[in-house]
Image: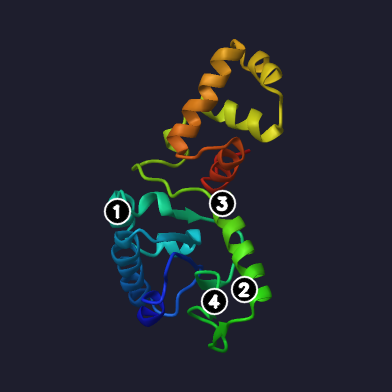
Amino acid sequence: MRQLLQRVRSEAVVAVSSPMRLEDHRALGHLAVRELTGTGKRIRLLYSPDFLESRDRRPLLEDSTLGPRIRVSSHDFQNTFIIDRHAAVLWSGAGAKQRYLVMVRDPALIGAIHQFAAMTWESAARPASRPGFGRAGFDERDLAVLDALNSGLKDEVAARRLGVSLRTYRRYVAELMVRLEVSTRFQVGVCAAQLGLLG
């Protein structure tokens, strides 16, 4: 993997649902951040919740360089490493019945793999960075706003339901977006679902 990382010229996408060996990926993550971002290259890291829970989150979340580049998705995805949209590596994870490592060089197939990985990364949530970030960190008002967003209510209807002004409701939504460290309402829903805050 290190040799592949050294070939990255502008962009890498690393999606890890289940690594072969955890220690190897820890080294890969450190190398990716320090070497790629240090030279101005773009890197996106996508993890499954199970994988993220299997490691110490603190170094990941305290690193201001790495934090914005990490997303967590509960959707199924393949362990993938994409280099500059010119090559991709797909590999099996721990516990696989048959281990495999496949190098893909076909431009059309790489395009499809990159599109899927990028869309999954864009729609995924950032990892929770504060202790006690789960349900306990949200009060009834927060949960009511999340429920209104999840229900697809128009802002005016949601504000009436909560008994607040339209402006106040929108402020509540904006505050939740900051707390969840996301930039769109769609991402609020994804993040809330992953944290078990809906319904």
The numbered disc on residue 88 is 4
N-terminal of the pair, mark 2 or mark 1, is: 1
Question: Is label 2 in contact with label 4 (beta carbons under 8 Å)?
Answer: yes
Question: Is label 3 in contact with label 4 (beta carbons under 8 Å)?
Answer: no
Q: Residue at x 66, y 35 (%)?
A: 150
N-terminal of the pair, mark 3 or mark 4, is: 4
The numbered disc on residue 103 is none
Picture layout, residue 190 above or below residue 60 = above
Spatial CA span between label 2 and label 4: 6 Å
Which residue corresponds to mark 1? Answer: 58
Q: Is residue 76 visible?
A: no
Spatial CA span between label 2 and label 3: 18 Å
N-terminal of the pair, mark 2 or mark 3, is: 2
Q: How many marks?
A: 4
Q: Is residue 30 visible?
A: yes
Which residue corresponds to mark 3? Answer: 122
Q: Nearer the viewer, mark 1 or mark 3?
A: 3
Q: Residue at x 37, y 41 (%)?
A: 132
Which residue corresponds to mark 2? Answer: 110
Amino acid, disc 4:
Ala
Amino acid, disc 3:
Glu
Q: Quadrant of the C terminus?
A: top right
- Residue 182 is situated, as x and y percent measured from the top left of the image, at 49, 40
Amino acid, disc 1:
Arg
**Residue 31 found in image quarter:** bottom left
Q: Nearer the viewer, residue 111 or 1?
A: 111
